[in-house]
Amino acid sequence: MVSLKRVSAIDRVCHGQEGATEKFFYMYMCHFSQVHVRLPLDDFTMGVLSALNVAHTQLHPNSWAYLQAFHILCQSLYLEPSPYAFLYFYDTRPRQPTTWFSLISRPSISRLDAFSQSFKHFKDGYFKVVVKEEGKPYFLNADGSTKFPFSWTGTPSRYKDMGTDELSAGDKEVVEILMKFVDKLPTKGLVRVYNSVHPIIDIEGICLLLKLC
């Protein structure tokens, strides 16, 4: 499906696809070890990257934690996670020149607490993911275009104070259910479910925390 390759001395996460014979993207080691991202990426995750118009490594690891926690939270509530229901809770402020891209919680409506992780030296550990022929349906559209940006973009999307009138009926329903919770939920605890030996038990624990059981 994919091939994981060590990077060379000249590889940089912000490099494009110039001269490459196969499609590839970079991933940080902390994506696997600390926020437990797995391959192939699910449609929700690829949809968020596409909506933000950023590559995998362009989104800061702390923002990945929000994304992962939101996914598990929706699973716990039997909701379908969607990119725009997720992005409703965040603002984005793209910087020029382009650098790592972060999601900023909207204070009045945020439902996840800060991940509280500095991710020191995360920039130093990364590798190249090369998409092989059998993996193309997971990462490429029928026309051969990528399902999310494989390389850093110079035009990340700007979101600020998104209104519910901008959401689809399904997204609005997800937001309305999550807005019923007053307290911020534990991002770190939610992310930890991905690496749990007993994920169902942990999800049930989250349900108890949410006072749903």
Image (cartoon, helix red, strand yellow):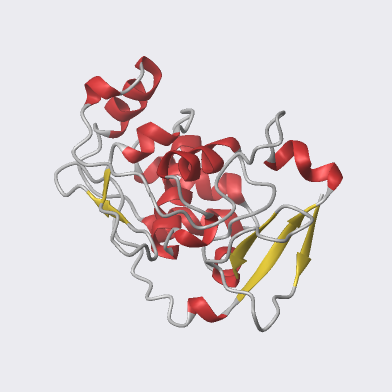
Say if 160 sits above or below 13 in the image. above
Q: Left or right: where does residue 2 sit relative to residue 207? A: right
Q: Which residue is located at x 23 percent, y 24 percent? A: 164
Q: Is residue 38 shown to the viewer in this render?
A: yes
Marks counted in the figure total: 0
**Residue lying furthest right:** 134
Residue at the outermost front position:
19
* Front position in the image: 22 or 77: 22
- The residue sitting at 59% across, 52% down in the picture is 150
Left or right for 103, reference 60: left
Image x and y of residue 27, in percent = 60, 64
- Choose top left, top right, bottom left or bottom right for residue 118: bottom left
Tell me, yes or no, if residue 213 can be seen here: no
The C terminus sits in image quarter? top left
Relative to 124, residue 199 above or below: above
Residue 206, position as x, y percentages in the image: 43, 46
* Residue 58 location (% of width, % of height): 46, 60
Residue 98 vs residue 180, the one in the foreground: 98
Q: Nearer the viewer, residue 200 or 29?
A: 29
Q: Is residue 45 above or below residue 104?
A: above
Residue in view at x 45 percent, y 45 percent: 53
Residue 14 picture location, percent across and down: 52, 66
In this image, 89 relative to 83: left or right?
A: left
Q: Residue furthest left?
A: 108
